[in-house]
Amino acid sequence: AKDEDVDYMVKLLEYNDDDDDDVVDDPARAFVKYAAAPTSSGKTASALVGFLASAEKYKEETSFTHYLYLAFANNNGTVFGMKEATKLSRDVIIAKKQGAAFALECLRKRLLDTTSGEKETDLDVDPPLMSETRDALKKLLDDHFPEDARILVHLDEHRDMCWIKRMLDQSAAFRQGFMETIADVERVTVLATYTAMPGEIPSTSSSGTCRYPVPVPPLDLDQVIADVEELRWPTNVTEFNKKEKRLWATLKFRLAAKLTKA
C-alpha cells in the first residue's frame, strides 16, 4: 500500500472523539472501529500494518504501543469460542451482559494462555452488570500493561464470535456487549474486521458507543510491479504507443482486481 493510504488509516485508528469537531463532538463517546471488505482483500493484515505504522513511525501520545489479536474463525484453528452456545440467554439484556463477560474471559485467555488451538469459554448464565465487567477488564489490562500503554484490540471475523440463526437478536446483543465493553475502557481502541460492518453497533449519529469505518489501504500495484521481477516491463512504459498503453492499463487492472459474478 502507498504510504499516504497507510497514514490515513492510522489517523482514523488513532482518532478519538476529542480530535475533530467536524466528525462528532461528544467526549464521552467510545468507538468500535471497523474494516469491512471482501475475503482475501487484506483487511486482516492491514490491521497489523496500521498498528506498526502507528507504533514505529509516529511515536506520539496517540500512537499504539500494544496489539492484541483475537480471531473468531480461521487463523489456523487458534480461535476464541463458546463451549455451549445453548447457554446463550433468550433475554437480549442478559445476552448483552454475557457478551461483556465473554470479552473479559477472552482477553484473560489471550494474555495468559500462549498455546495455539481453540480457546473455548463457558458462558456465564448469570453475568454481572456490564459496568462491573468493564471495571474488571480495566483492572486486567492495568495489571499487564504500563500506565501509558495504548492498546489496539483487533477482533477478526467478529461476526463468528456468536451467530445463532434461531437467535439472531440475542446473538447481536451478545456481540454488542462484547465490543462495547472493550471499547469503553480508556486507552483501548477496538478494530473489528469482517466482510460486513458490525451492524449491531449503532452509527455515529447515535449516542453512546458507536461504529466508525476505517478503510483498508488499497494495493499499490506500481510498487508490486517494481518489486516482482516477473512483472517488470522490459521497456519504458512512458514510450508506449496508444495501443500498448491500453494493453498495459488492462494488464494492471487485471492484476489489481478480482472479478466475480454479480
Image (cartoon, rainbow, N blue to C red):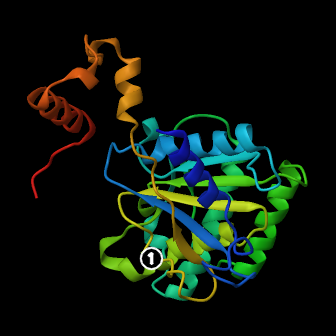
Above or below for 99 versus 29: above
* In-image side of 107 versus 86 (left or right): right
Quarter occupied by residue 194: bottom left
Residue 124 seen from this side? no
User: Going by the image, does 158 lie left or right of 14?
Assistant: left
Q: Secondary structure at mark 1?
A: helix
**Can the viewer see residue 187 in this picture?**
yes
User: Residue 214 location, x and y as percent?
Assistant: 51, 60
Q: Depth check: give the residue in front, 85 or 175.
A: 175
The location of residue 116, given as percent across then percent down, is 56, 34
> Label 1: how many residues lie within 10 Å, few (<14), some (14-19) or many (20+)?
many
Judge left or right: residue 202 versus residue 138.
left
Measuring from the top left, give residue 164's x and y in whole percent: 36, 70
User: Which residue does the image show at 50% across and 86% down from the upper left?
Assistant: 92
**Residue found at x 48% / y 74%:** 88
Q: Nearer the viewer, residue 55 or 98?
A: 55
Quadrant of the drawing holding the C terminus: bottom left
Give whichever of 210, 95 is nearer the camera. Answer: 210
Residue type at mark 1 is Ala
Task: Pinpoint residue 211: horizontal percent, then vertical percent.
Answer: 53, 73
Residue lying at 77% horizontally and 54% vertically, measured from the top left: 150
Q: Quadrant of residue 248?
A: top left
194, above or below 42, in the image: below
Name which quarter of the figure residue 19 lies in: bottom right
Read off the residue under disc 1.
172
Of residue 164 and residue 32, the one placed in the foreground of this image is 32
